[in-house]
Image (cartoon, rainbow, N blue to C red):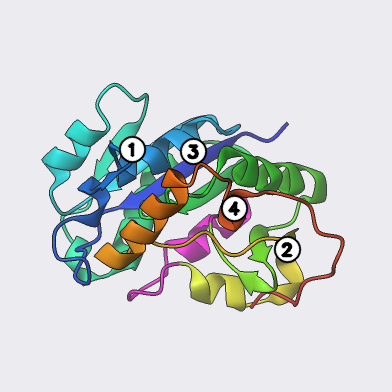
Amino acid sequence: MRPVVAVVLAAGASRRFGENKLLASLDGVPVIRRTVQNVLDSPVRAVHVVLGRDAGLVRLALAGLPVDFVHNADYRSGMSTSLRAGVEAARIDGDFGLLVALGDQPSVTPAIIGRIIESYRRSRMAIVAPVYRGIRGNPVLFDAEIVSELLDVRGDEGARQVIARDSGRVEPVAFDSLPPPDVDTPSELAALQTDLAREEQPLWAQASRSDDTPEPVG
């Protein structure tokens, strides 16, 4: 069985949020801690967290969790710098899968990640990406053969260009739910808090299987 290691990108500048969004409280727990805990609760071998802004405070928010930290001093130059730093740290010998998750998506559940990993091991495709009601989202899983391409990414688009390069090597995993939201603004955080307060399972938290064929990714 191919091992899967995870990289959580948590180095962003939070320009739209103002303060560091990853440290904001969501039902009493920092956003980044919720995100990382969900990844840890999924079938991954190890978790690497890429730090940038407020690195020391983010470390404190994750105190006690079994993760490795990677510092990206160049985080202001865009997401690609954090992606490259995480990939370099997470690479292991042999065949493996690399799951790339975003630190500001605390509503990506272990069930969602588990289905992505299950599809990767079954399909042996180079890239496995979730598709939420026809919309490609995150996290995305890359096979070891793609790692060199991830290290060539530049700018602030993350791995989008790698995914779009060849749709034939992408395995879509369909979810009959809305994409898990980012926490980019205080209003988006408030909306997530409202969902939790309702004590209902919001659509983005569901990981039900869809029989519909999704639109091609990329």
How far is disc 3 from disc 4 in space, using C-alphas?
Answer: 13 Å
Q: Earlier in the sequence, mark 2 or mark 4?
A: 4
Whether the residues at callouts 2 and 4 have beta carbons within 8 Å, the answer is no
Quadrant in which residue 37 is drawn: top left
Residue receiving disc 3: 39
Q: Earlier in the sequence, mark 1 or mark 2?
A: 1
How far is disc 1 from disc 2 in space, using C-alphas?
Answer: 27 Å
The amino acid at mark 4 is Leu
Whether the residues at callouts 3 and 2 have beta carbons within 8 Å, the answer is no
Can residue 185 be spotted in the picture?
no
How far is disc 3 from disc 1 in space, using C-alphas?
Answer: 10 Å
Q: Which mark is residue 172?
A: 2
Q: Earlier in the sequence, mark 3 or mark 1?
A: 1
Residue situated in front as seen by the camera: 37 or 121: 37
Mark 1 element type:
helix
The amino acid at mark 1 is Arg
Relative to residue 63, is residue 114 depicted above or below?
Answer: below
